[in-house]
Amino acid sequence: KTVCLMDGTGSMGGLLQKAKSTVGTMFERACDVLKDNKMDTNCFQLQFAVYRDYDCKLEGLLETSPWETKPDNLRVFMEKISAKGGGDYEEAIEIGLWHANQENEKDGISQVILIGDAPAKNESQIQEYRKSYGGEEYWKSSKFKEPTHYLYELQKLKNKSVPVHTFFIESGAESNFREIATKSGGRCERLDVNSSSGAQILTDLVTEEILRNIGQSNGSSETLVNAYRSKFGKSYK
């Protein structure tokens, strides 16, 4: 089970559009490789979760899809998602990681893929934004009643051996994304989603991580990833 966390604030329209167009390809390619290697094509589930910032209030701070083993419902979910909000530079990554922990406590998850162009907020920024956009009384009546911080949520994922693989779109997010990946045992890469081959890069990235994770159960991670690259090529370094 892979949670794909995506920044959905105003600057992220390009990523969201590419996710809408590639979700079917991700599933199809993963299934093709699994079939070729005589593995069950229903052995993985994917969930998309879009986090923004507190200025989006309860309606837009976090939007999540159901868990899916087929692409159609994910495509329908993504069609309704638009880029909006994000009043300052840093975004509410802690809310995305909080959601990953909620899902892990329910039924266990294997990994998190985090994609964004801005780093996480610090504790004082979180307090300030919660106060400015609704106040604590407003937030206390919701599932986000307790303020949290990315390091706290990250430690919980690490304690459960759930890696967070991070892919930063802008260099300003690199340091924070690299820290998140390193502390959780994940990997960190730059994602040039706005390039001419951005959709292909996004497809490769997500599909390879799904296959790598599936292969951990029987030591076939590299076999599956290499089979993918052999069959479909690789458009990012």
Image: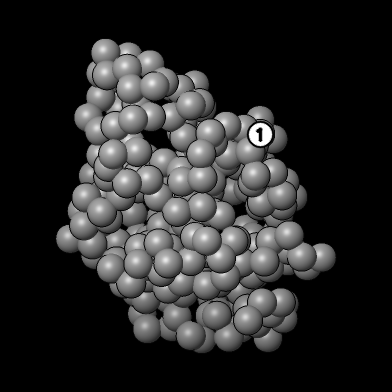
Where's the N terminus, which quadrant? bottom left
- 22 or 81, nearer to the observer: 81
Height in image: 101 above or below 55?
below
Image-based side of 211 in relation to 151, left or right: right
Can you see residue 97?
yes
What's the amino acid at mark 1? Answer: Ser
Question: Residue 215: image x %, image y %?
Answer: 43, 76
**Residue drawn at (62%, 32%) of the image:** 84
**Residue drawn at (64%, 69%) of the image:** 204
Height in image: 11 above or below 109?
above
- 61 or 11, nearer to the observer: 11
- 16 or 169, nearer to the observer: 169
Height in image: 72 above or below 133?
below
Question: Residue 202: image x %, image y %?
Answer: 65, 63
Image-based side of 42 in relation to 99, left or right: right
Question: Residue 178: image x %, image y %?
Answer: 41, 69
**Residue drawn at (42%, 73%) of the image:** 187
Q: Label 1 belongs to which residue?
A: 82
**Residue drawn at (63%, 38%) of the image:** 10
- 81 or 119, nearer to the observer: 119
For residue 75, what is the image quadrant? top right
Where's the C terminus, which quadrant? bottom right
Outermost residue to the left: 159
Callout 1 environment at 10 Å: few (<14), some (14 to 19), or many (20+)?
some
Question: Residue 37: image x %, image y %?
Answer: 55, 79
**What kind of element bears circle 1?**
loop
Can you see residue 207?
no
